[in-house]
Image (cartoon, grey):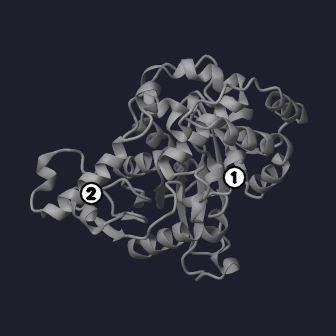
């Protein structure tokens, strides 16, 4: 069945009251020495949780999400929630956008408008998009069924689901964009559905030195050092990935029972990726709390980690089935590696203040997507 149903976000007030009550009754851990080196500092988290309980207004963000038409449909035994915002421009390009981890479709709140209705935002209307932004399986309003499907949700399975979603919506020719986890799905979708995908545009992830000596052939010592620095940054951090890959169910209990446990985990990821929490956050903290609220209110903190326990986390695949654009690709030396396995038609070297580009630098991402597809179309 190809049933598509309208979806309107309306969280019961009892759920919001319960969240505030749990936040106010948090049993706080003693503060350890060492600041962020030991994890999220207790004073920082106390202040942020207090704001979540008494300063953050979920209804404002709920209304912002409901500005865009939303729907659900069933594909391969899984409920898929998605935003479907059509452009008023007659030659708009259909574009499926896949969000990051640990994130949600809220990541795209500030970019959907300029992409779909550029005229209204002072941009050239000749480059416009019909945006389809699904919630990844196991995230927010695409929760896993109970009991969960035992088949792995691999990146390939998600890509096949996205191809079916676009077919179901009647799009014969479309582009694809993604960030982080979405940057894994997007080139896979391009490879699987190259008959319909016109271009794969991701924020970053291509051209990373993986440790293969063959990748360094032809590079100078300075370039090799630059690539090594990038690789070291990719492999550093708290070690959360191996734990998620092996014991996600254990963490899921805390995420589902304690909003502070869920918040601490999300904030630590933003800190680890971007230096978030160091006093100069690139992302509005209420947007981060909106994302945390979606995880908490849907109970998907544990299920959203499937990219790790299914072995789906890593780097985007190389593919030459369709042209590739990279909006925030980084140094030119990385492009040289990326070009060995991809047909790179656009490479943006613009710096983003955050790994979550759409949240921290929406104008930069919109410009990058528009520039990439101007070349591709």
Q: CA distance from mark 1 to mark 2?
A: 39 Å
Give the residue pinned by disc 2: 320
Q: Is residue 75 visible?
A: yes
Where residue 95 sits: x, y (%)?
53, 60
Mark 2 packing: few (<14 Cα in 10 Å), some, or many (20+)? some
Q: Is residue 22 left or right of residue 112?
A: right
Sequence order check: which comes first, mark 1 or mark 2? Answer: 1
Q: Quadrant of the C terminus?
A: bottom left
Tag 1 secondary structure: helix
- Residue, x 66% and y 35% (percent of image)? 42
Which residue is more in the foreground, 257 or 348?
Answer: 257
Where residue 170 sits: x, y (%)?
57, 55
Which residue is more in the foreground, 202 or 145?
Answer: 202
- Residue, x 33% and y 64% (percent of image)? 323
Give the residue pinned by disc 1: 285
Residue 282: name its quadrant: bottom right
Q: Quadrant of the N terminus?
A: top right
Q: Is residue 316 visible?
A: no
Where residue 371 sits: x, y (%)?
45, 75
- Residue, x 54% and y 46% (percent of image)? 271
Which residue is more in the foreground, 278 or 336?
Answer: 278
Residues at marks 1 and 2 touching, judged by CB atoms closer than 8 Å: no
Question: In the rendered view, would you say 166 is above or below 222?
Answer: above
Mark 1 packing: few (<14 Cα in 10 Å), some, or many (20+)? some
Which residue is more in the foreground, 32 or 64?
Answer: 32
Q: Nearer the viewer, mark 1 or mark 2?
A: 1
Tag 2 secondary structure: loop
Q: Is residue 245 left or right of residue 133?
A: left
């Amino acid at each position: 069945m190809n049933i598509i149903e309208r979806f309107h976000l309306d969280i019961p007030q009892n759920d919001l009251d319960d969240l505030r009550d749990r936040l106010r009754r948090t049993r706080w851990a003693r503060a350890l020495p060492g600041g962020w080196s030991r994890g999220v500092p207790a004073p920082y988290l106390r202040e942020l949780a207090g704001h979540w309980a008494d300063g953050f207004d979920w209804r404002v963000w709920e209304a912002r999400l409901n500005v865009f038409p939303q729907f659900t449909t069933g594909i391969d035994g899984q409920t898929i929630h998605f935003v479907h915002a059509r452009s008023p421009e007659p030659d708009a390009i259909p574009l499926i956008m896949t969000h990051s981890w640990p994130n949600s479709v809220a990541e795209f709140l500030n970019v959907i408008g300029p992409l779909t209705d550029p005229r209204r935002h002072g941009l050239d209307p000749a480059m416009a998009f019909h945006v389809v932004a699904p919630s990844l399986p196991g995230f927010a309003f695409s929760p896993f069924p109970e009991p969960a499907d035992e088949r792995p949700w691999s990146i390939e399975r998600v890509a096949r689901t996205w191809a079916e979603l676009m077919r179901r919506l009647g799009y014969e020719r479309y582009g694809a964009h993604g960030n982080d986890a979405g940057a894994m799905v997007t080139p896979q979708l391009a490879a699987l559905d190259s008959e319909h995908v016109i271009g794969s545009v991701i924020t970053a992830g291509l051209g990373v030195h993986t440790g293969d000596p063959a990748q360094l052939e032809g590079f100078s010592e300075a370039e090799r050092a630059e690539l090594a620095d990038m690789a070291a940054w990719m492999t550093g951090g708290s070690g959360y990935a191996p734990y998620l890959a092996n014991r996600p169910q254990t963490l899921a209990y805390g995420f589902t029972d304690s909003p502070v446990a869920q918040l601490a985990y999300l904030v630590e990821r933003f800190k680890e990726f971007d230096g978030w929490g160091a006093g100069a956050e690139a992302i509005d903290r209420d947007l981060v709390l909106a994302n945390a609220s979606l995880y908490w209110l849907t109970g998907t903190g544990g299920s959203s980690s499937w990219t790790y326990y299914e072995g789906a986390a890593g780097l985007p695949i190389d593919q030459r089935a369709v042209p590739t654009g990279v909006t925030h690709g980084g140094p030119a030396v990385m492009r040289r590696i990326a070009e060995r396995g991809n047909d790179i038609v656009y490479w943006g070297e613009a710096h983003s203040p955050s790994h979550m580009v759409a949240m921290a630098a929406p104008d930069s991402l919109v410009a990058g997507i528009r520039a990439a597809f101007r070349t591709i179309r």
